[in-house]
């Protein structure tokens, strides 16, 4: 995990990056995989804006520190996972073959940190 | 050709617009529709992904606010009517907006240079307020928006208290001396400084020439790399419109984005009369005149003797 480059790109949010770095370091030492929502990351980081956090997350995804998952939830089963918004089709079908239209209510974003694979 | 990266402020505003259009029904809240809309904007892959993430986050966690507190400081001979406008404009982006008042500060107190007796009271009041905000809220960013005498107050507070460190400082109608050493200030605001300069503002010149401790940074700017300066065709209190606050102050305070004013290129200096006034320094002329009236009888008595 390299957070130094993030400090360089977001100097005014260095505290937020330090908070994230501490959190992920702890998860890596415990070899834990954690699934975090945007609001949980916001709470951990305490960034200066939502947009800044969204951009920091983007860099962590690009650096393979986080994996982004958009999960379209439906009644039967946990739902279907996609890596980006543009991959989500107009219609999906649940396990019972019923049509589900992904929208902002049934589609949730998660960010996975694989502590067991992370370099500490 | 590489696409230019959008600023955080642009992305946040764009996300707010998309969410508002969903609320109005002009964009359906279906993921495919949102995704097509974002693709149609022609952003880079990184910006499009970031914007998509923001839109989903805002629809699901719309109430997330950074732990950022904005403190507003007004000037003299005012009850800070502009602070209501600022509270409205800033509240969606931060935890709290605190309009600090230190009472009606009159011209005599403003002019009188003996700081502890006259200027000291509002300085101590603001100092106490900032200390209690920092103590009451843990892990919070505190930024200040100061107008006129409020800029003088905050410059003194920062010099007297190195343990008070602001996140951002936005000044307008500033009367801080031009030589104020931002570079060597140990507690210089870490998120940036912006000075809104009024090219038609003459009050800072009068303050500089009539008394001690003030400067015309609200008319001329500081002229240092430490402060981002933005020139506007305004007088002393022309900054307080919704348009100005949303166009220049919100991007700076909440995203550190310096939106350049077009007047930066076309600005003109105040006339030579004002330059002469600065050069003469009326306060010294007044002292010389008073001294002359005191000394003159003694000189006359000496000559007669």
Image (tube, rainbow, N blue to C red):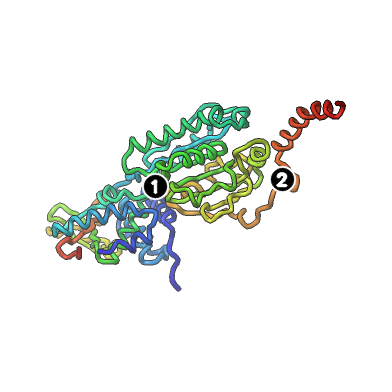
Q: What is the chain identity of the residue bearing mark 2?
A: B
Q: Secondary structure at mark 1?
A: helix
> Who comes first in sequence, dot 2 or dot 1?
1
| Horizontal arrangement in the rendering, residue A60 relative to residue B254 (left or right) | left
Q: Is B217 situated left or right of A75 in this image?
A: right
Q: As rendered, which of B171 and B56 lies closer to the eye?
A: B171
Q: Quadrant of the N terminus of chain A?
A: bottom left
Please tell me if label 2 and label 1 are on a single chain.
yes
Asked if residue A2 is positioned above or below residue A38 in the image, the reply reads: below
Residue B202 falls in image quadrant = top right
Query: Circle 2: is it few (<14), some (14-19), or many (20+) Cα within 10 Å?
Result: few
User: Which x, y percent locates residue B50?
Assistant: 35, 59
Considering every residue shown, the one lying at the far right of the view is B304
Q: Nearer the viewer, residue B239 or B141?
A: B141
Q: Name the residue at 69% across, 36% down.
A: B283
Residue B24 image label: 1
**Residue B93 placed where, x, y %?**
40, 44
Residue assigned mark 2: B279
**Image depth: mark 2 or mark 1 in front:** 2
Q: Nearer the viewer, residue B207 or B248?
A: B207
Residue A107 visible in the picture: no
Which residue is most to the front? B305
Q: Position of residue B144 (x, y in %)?
A: 46, 41
Left or right: A76, with B125 as reference point: left
Q: CA distance from mark 2 to mark 1?
A: 59 Å
Q: Residue at x 43, y 58 (%)?
A: B7
Letter of the chain that mark 1 sits on in the rendering? B
Q: Is residue B288 visible?
A: yes
Tell me the quarter of the picture where residue A113 sits: bottom left
* Residue sitting at x 42%, y 33%: B129
Give SS at disc 2: helix
């Amino acid at each position: 995990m390299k957070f130094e480059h993030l400090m360089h790109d977001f100097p005014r949010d260095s505290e937020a990056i330090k908070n994230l770095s501490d959190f992920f370091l702890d998860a890596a030492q415990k070899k834990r995989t954690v699934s975090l929502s945007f609001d949980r990351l916001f709470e951990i980081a305490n960034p200066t804006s939502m947009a800044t956090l969204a951009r920091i997350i983007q860099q962590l995804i690009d650096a393979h520190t986080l994996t982004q998952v958009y999960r379209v939830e439906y009644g039967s089963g946990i739902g279907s996972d996609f890596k980006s918004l543009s991959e989500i089709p107009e219609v999906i079908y649940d396990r019972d073959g019923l049509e589900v239209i992904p929208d902002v209510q049934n589609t949730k974003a998660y960010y996975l940190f694989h502590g067991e694979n992370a370099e500490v | 050709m590489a696409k230019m990266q959008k600023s955080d402020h642009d992305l946040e505003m764009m996300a707010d617009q998309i969410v508002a259009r969903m609320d109005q029904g002009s964009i359906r809240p279906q993921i495919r529709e949102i995704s097509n809309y974002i693709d149609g904007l022609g952003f880079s892959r990184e910006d499009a992904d970031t914007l998509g993430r923001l839109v989903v986050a805002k629809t699901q966690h719309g109430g997330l606010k950074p732990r950022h507190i904005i403190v507003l400081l007004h000037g003299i001979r005012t009850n800070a009517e502009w602070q209501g406008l600022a509270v409205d404009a800033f509240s969606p982006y931060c935890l709290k907006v605190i309009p600090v008042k230190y009472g009606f500060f009159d011209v005599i107190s403003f002019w009188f240079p003996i700081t502890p007796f006259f200027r000291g009271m509002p300085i101590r009041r603001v100092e106490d307020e900032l200390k209690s905000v920092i103590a009451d809220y843990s892990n919070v960013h505190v930024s200040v928006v100061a107008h006129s005498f409020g800029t003088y107050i905050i410059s003194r507070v920062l010099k007297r208290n190195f343990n008070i460190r602001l996140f951002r400082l936005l000044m307008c109608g500033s009367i801080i001396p031009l030589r104020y050493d931002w570079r060597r200030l140990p507690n210089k605001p870490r998120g940036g400084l912006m000075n809104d300069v009024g090219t038609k503002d003459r009050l800072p010149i009068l303050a500089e020439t009539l008394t001690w401790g003030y400067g015309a940074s609200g008319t001329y700017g500081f002229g240092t790399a430490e402060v981002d300066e933005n020139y506007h065709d305004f007088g002393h209190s022309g900054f307080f419109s919704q348009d100005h606050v949303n166009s220049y102050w919100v991007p700076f305070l909440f995203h550190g984005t310096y939106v350049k004013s077009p007047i930066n290129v076309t600005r003109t200096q105040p006339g030579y009369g004002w330059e002469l006034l600065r050069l003469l320094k009326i306060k010294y002329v007044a002292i010389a005149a008073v001294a002359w009236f005191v000394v003159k009888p003694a000189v006359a008595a000496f000559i007669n003797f």
